[in-house]
Image: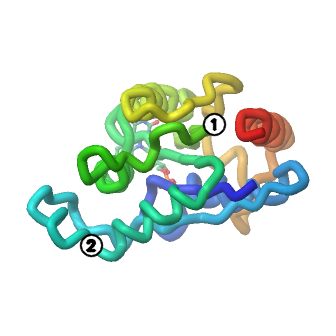
Amino acid sequence: MNIVAISGSLRKESFNTRLLHSLQSLAPAGMTITPFDISALPLYDQDAEASFPAAAQALKDAIAAADGIVIATPEYNRSISGALKNAIDWASRPYGQNSFAGKPVLTMGVSIGKLGTALAQSHLKQIMVYLNARVIGQPELHFGPAHELFDGSGTLVDQAARELLGKALSVLAERIA
Ligand SMILES: Cc1cc2nc3c(=O)[nH]c(=O)nc-3n(C[C@H](O)[C@H](O)[C@H](O)COP(=O)(O)O)c2cc1C
């Protein structure tokens, strides 16, 4: 199983990107999780679809080749980040070639607050349902406060979070099989 993993945060020390990097060690046998960096994507512009940008095409190709998708979103002002929405908009185009259709999608997120991206993920799941992705509803993966979950070197050390993530990846594997 080939999984593409997208972080909605562009910052170097991102907790969400760290969350994604912890996944491979928690994944069931036969699952390979490959991060896709969305920072090179230009701002979505419908005029630019005529000569589809290489970075956007690379995202579409990665999703097309994947059996499933994991998205870790930060919560910005109670929604997903602009960078993540931009990536989703590119991958949903051109009209009729929405890359998410039929793909199993597992969402997760970590925030510095106790709600742990619950509201951002609610928006993200709505978008994914609209795009006809096969969204996994349970388990919900809302993590926070972030500073209690990672050690100084950025390793996810919270045991409950690790167990829940392992369980969620098994659900993703079942959804693919
Ligand atoms: C523009 C902006 C808006 C934010 N809004 C929220 C919010 O609505 N809820 C929340 O829990 N945290 C919010 N935060 C704090 C983020 O949880 C925190 O910056 C987190 O570290 C972002 O994820 P990252 O570490 O992956 O970059 C916001 C941060 C920024 C920069």
> How many neighbours does mark 1 have within 10 angstroms: few (below 14), some (14-19), or many (20 or more)?
many
Q: Which mark is residue 172?
A: none
Residue at 60% across / 64% down in the picture?
35
Residue at 46% across / 39% down in the picture?
101
- The picture places residue 128, in percent across and down from the top left corner, at 44, 34
**Residue placed under numbered mark 1 in the picture:** 143
As drawn, the residue found furthest toward the right would be: 29
* Mark 1 residue element: strand
Residue at 53% across / 42% down in the picture?
112
Badge 2 amino acid = Pro
- The picture places residue 79, in percent across and down from the top left corner, at 36, 35
How many numbered markers are drawn? Answer: 2
Q: Is residue 177 above or below residue 6?
A: above
Q: Quadrant of residue 21?
A: bottom right
Camera-side residue of 88 and 104: 104
Q: In the shown orientation, is residue 127 left or right of residue 49?
A: right
- The picture places residue 110, in percent across and down from the top left corner, at 58, 43
Badge 1 amino acid = Phe
Would residue 151 be visible to someone looking at this image? no
The colour scheme used to paint the residues is rainbow
Q: CA distance from mark 2 to mark 1?
A: 34 Å
Q: Is residue 83 above or below residue 136?
A: below
- The picture places residue 100, in percent across and down from the top left corner, at 46, 44
* Mark 2 residue element: loop
Q: In the shown orientation, is residue 3 left or right of residue 37?
A: right
Q: Quadrant of residue 154?
A: bottom right
Q: Quadrant of the C terminus?
A: top right
Q: Nearer the viewer, mark 2 or mark 1?
A: 2
**Residue placed under numbered mark 2 in the picture:** 53
